[in-house]
Amino acid sequence: MEVSRRPRRFFIETWGCQMNELDSQRMAGQLMQQGILPTREPREADVILLNSCSVREKAEQKVYSRLGEYRRLKRDGRELLIGLCGCVAQQEGERALARVPDLDFVLGPARVGELQDVLARRRAGERVVATGFPAERTYDVDAVSRHGEYKGMVTIIEGCNKNCTFCIVPQTRGPERSRPLAEIVREVRHLLDYGFQEVELLGQTVNHWREPGGDLDFADLLEEVAALPGLERLRFVTSYPRDFTPRMVEQVGKHANICPSLHLPVQSGADSVLRRMGRGYTRREYLDLVAQLRRARPDLALSTDLIVGFPGETEEEFRLTLELVEAVGFSGVYAFKYSPRPGTAAPRLGGAVDAEEASERLQRLFALQEGIQRQINAALVGKSLEVIVTGWGKQPGTQTGRTPCHRVIHFAAGSEPVTLGGVTRVQVEEAFAYSLLGRRIELGGTSGTAETPGTTGQEG
Ligand code: SF4
């Protein structure tokens, strides 16, 4: 009898931040080393991984309904392994196995490097829970599947020691742990050898990196990494305002290949709310830092995170947030309604804001921000920008890319489309709140213009 053979396939669904994206690339790489190939179709998969996020309650609730959908794929008797990974895995552990009978294993973020071992143990019959934060961790840079990515991501610091009162990350990602500089430089070099033009350094508090057992800090790391030959664009995310030092600001101003875009979460514009959040800086200190950064790098585009409806937030406190948003002129805002997370201090503060009131505030914030973005982006019309091509556009014959300030830009591909990850120049012809539209121009055909975002009245 002829035995039908087909390659084994895996499907990974990723939620949340860039750290999770990189973890998914690491897991994909380990599966490919075992000869298991990727698929975009869960019904074709022999291994399904749900790489989850628990920053907001809604995402966490969705995990169980999604696992329920995947479980149903086991009904046709096919051999299928389902793993829960990411922050919900760390948080739920054994509970997830008890709640989802067909779940095969649970793999926390600090145990991603152990996927192959976990699969082997499962195949031997064990339902595995691999969570917690071991001192020794496996990280094989050669086993990261970066296929299709225009930028290479490198974790430089894991976990967080800050304990902001709303945040679950210190529980799910564990205590702070910096990687040695030599290891980071080796990984960046490895990416450059593979042809990546853009590298993004990752960490929950990326600018709190310290050389383990040494004196070097993030300013020294920037100095060393930015100087690596062949590195066109260097980004880092997420910066913690209080951890920025004058030396780091100086580095941002000094290296042209450090991208003029910075994500600097402020969370609220009111000192009283910042205190209740345990953020450790004031509105004035944040605005002073913004002013220092813009002095060092006038073309800097800033984005931020904001929480609306934090316990006890009054209309006046929210108004201060709107004022701050207007004063800074952010090029992007990631704003969410406050979501109570288990094991955090904020739910005990009392003063819950009415859900409708919080939604209404969020809408007001979005409306304000949309107007600001339209104004900032409109100032780019007519400028020629260097663009890294990230993919094909939705319209036939168009491509999309990212400007140095990380804005999305669409343009006609022309007769010779640029390969993914390649660099071209695009003249901006139209601007919207969330993207730009332009046409490709010959290199050297138009004088280069810096992508300078406008501001709406800068304080500080
Ligand atoms: S700095 Fe605060 S918000 Fe950021 S990960 Fe740490 S605890 Fe969470």
Image (cartoon, rainbow, N blue to C red):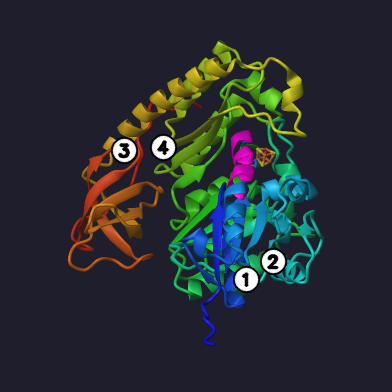
Residue 211 percent location from the top left of the image? 72, 59
Residue type indicated by callout 1? Gln
| Residue picked out by circle 2 | 115
**Going 52% across and 42% down the picture, which residue do you hit?**
263
Q: Determine contact: label 1, label 4, CB under 8 Å.
A: no
Q: Measure how far apart labels 3 and 2 are at the Cα level.
A: 43 Å
**Which region shows up in magenta?**
57-67
The extreme right residue here reads 135
Residue 200 percent location from the top left of the image? 52, 57
Mark nearer the N terminus (3 vs 2): 2
Residue type indicated by callout 4? Ser
Mark nearer the N terminus (2 vs 1): 1
| Residue picked out by circle 3 | 377
**Labels 3, 2: front one:** 2
Residue 110 percent location from the top left of the image? 72, 57
Mark 4: give few (<14), some (14-19) or many (20+) Cα within 10 Å.
many
Q: Measure how far apart labels 1 and 4 are at the Cα level.
A: 37 Å
**Going 69% across and 31% down the picture, which residue do you hit?**
280
Q: Determine contact: label 2, label 1, CB under 8 Å.
A: yes
Mark 1: is the Cβ under 8 angstroms from ligand 1? no
Q: Measure how far apart labels 2 and 1 are at the Cα level.
A: 7 Å
Residue type indicated by callout 2? Leu
Q: Does any portion of residue 213 appear in the rendered image?
A: yes
| Residue picked out by circle 4 | 331
Mark nearer the N terminus (1 vs 4): 1
Secondary structure at numbered mark 4: loop
Q: Measure how far apart labels 4 and 3 are at the Cα level.
A: 8 Å
